[in-house]
Image (cartoon, coloured by chain):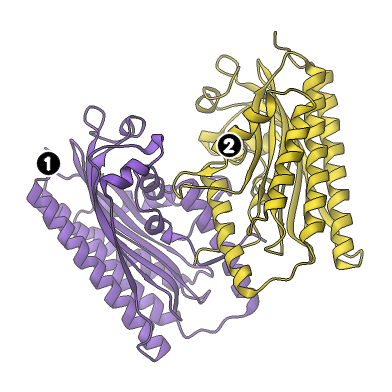
Chain colours: A yellow, B purple
Amino acid sequence: MTYNASSNDKQLLSTWFQQLQSKIIESLLKLEHQYAQNQDAQFVLREWNRSASDAQALPTSRESHEHGGGGKSATLKGSLFEKAGVNFSEVFGKFSPEFARQIPGAQHDPSFWASGVSVVIHPRSPHVPAIHMNTRMIVTNQTWFGGGADLTPIFPVEQDTLDFHQALADCCNRHNPDYYPKYKAWADSYFFLPHRNEPRGIGGIFYDNLNSGNFGADVNFTHDVGQTFIDIYEILVKRNMSKTWTEEERAYQLMRRGRYVEFNLLYDRGTLFGLKTGGHTESILMSLPPEVSWP
Amino acid sequence: MTYNASSNDKQLLSTWFQQLQSKIIESLLKLEHQYAQNQDAQFVLREWNRSASDAQALPTSRESHEHGGGGKSATLKGSLFEKAGVNFSEVFGKFSPEFARQIPGAQHDPSFWASGVSVVIHPRSPHVPAIHMNTRMIVTNQTWFGGGADLTPIFPVEQDTLDFHQALADCCNRHNPDYYPKYKAWADSYFFLPHRNEPRGIGGIFYDNLNSGNFGADVNFTHDVGQTFIDIYEILVKRNMSKTWTEEERAYQLMRRGRYVEFNLLYDRGTLFGLKTGGHTESILMSLPPEVSWP
């Protein structure tokens, strides 16, 4: 038996996603200030609304009605974190007919509601891994959770890889012993670039369409993924942030970032979902690295 | 009455596309050597084969049989031209069922043959416009030509814009008075980024599915597009290449190049066609600019 989220449930999740955004911002700022040994770096916050007039401006293929909601994007351009984007959004509307066919529960009624947090961090140092985390709840005629976290080191370090996977395994196992093997395999197949025949990074977990029948349990799992991300990334950053790097290592990093761009624009569901549903382009593409090369 | 290309016709076009590639290389090298006042810069040539074993290595979604053909990519990394890619390819095989549905004449028999030349040039100076040109012939149960040329100045100059459009108008009008208005409008709608609500550059011409019923006439038009591209770009480059630029102008250029990447990976048919038909990734993505920023 699956559940359907009520208005109260939506409110609950939206509020919690905003709290998660604040927690992540706080954690990243602490690391940034510790690294730079000053308090100068700050996130820039931007609120955006997805108003009816925005919907009007959309080209035909992205047209939809009863658009609404908005979000809050937070961007840090620091010394440690060359570019870190932490986005919260809560949007609702109707999918275009073409898009509705692809979405569970939207075949007959294209109405949707979605809220979530999305984080992408590109450190300046090639020795500090880039990371991505996202958790979200989506409501059509069905309700489900999705999300995940994956790590993209430029120069993978075995202990980091082991610790990252272990933290996610522990997180999953606190909720359901079936989750980790399934969600790790899903990440391995999802974060993959067919045209390069290579993975994006070292993987992590990826899940979607999660409705276990127990709303409270799924909310708790969502909370845990968010907190696990904060805790393990803090460990990995502190472990690597004092390493120096060469120009060659930096050049290699910029080239590898090109792969990140290719993945996000060619394959990433969240990116394409956002762009096709009239999302806030600047927030969606905040995931793209600050400096990139295709040499 | 439309025509169907014979084996001889395919051979003719493939040979001509290779000659066009050589002419373009020659023209760009002359400009590069004139600018750098030495003969150091050279194109790097790479031949690639699309062998059966490549097809085996493709993931399921890109699987196909009787793959074959290959191409020759030429890349220049110079002083004037920070990155110029001039690609020739001649490939054949069978489309995947999913892809075949979208291609004229491939619904019942997924066999295809395609040959063409594709050029993307990213000058180092923000005052020398980037340019793209492509001409191709595709054969399924139907035969057609496609192609176009479009200009992407970072800081548009009115006279350049006028001259570029005039050159293409003259070219089209030498063949059919209906072509220019139709193909210019097609470029305007094609080279457009819906998620940014902005055009990629100042446009040009874009055409596809061209089979006028007169094979010789379509071949002549294809020849003329190639030569017109060479002639007008030479004029525009010479006109702008001695201008100096500031750091701010360079930073703006790198940001604008991000839009070029977004277009190619999100929307460009040639790029997606190539990646989905098991094309040569390095050649296809040679269109991506050498240095890019998403600040």
Place of residue A165 in the rendered image (x, y in percent of width and height, measured from the top left): 70, 41
Which of the numbered marks, if any, corresponds to residue B4?
A: 1
Q: Is disc 2 surrounded by few (<14), some (14 to 19) or many (20+) residues within 10 Å?
A: few
Question: Whole-percent x and y of residue B231?
Answer: 29, 73
In the image: residue A210, left or right of residue B130: right
- Report the chain holding disc 2: A
Residue A45 shows in the view = no
- Reply above or below: A195 against B27: above
Q: Which residue is drawn at 53% across and 28% down?
A: A99
In-image side of A293 versus B214 (left or right): right
Which structural element holds mark 2? helix
Q: In this view, does A108 lie to the left or right of B213?
A: right
Q: Are discs 1 and 2 less than 8 Å apart at CB?
A: no
Chain ID for label 1?
Answer: B
Q: Residue at x 82, y 31 (%)?
A: A223
Residue drawn 58% across the image and 37% down it: A269
Residue annotated with mark 2: A269
* Element assignment for label 1: loop
Amino acid at pointer 2:
Arg
Q: Nearer the viewer, residue B5 or B87?
A: B87
* Cα–Cα span, label 1 and label 2: 40 Å
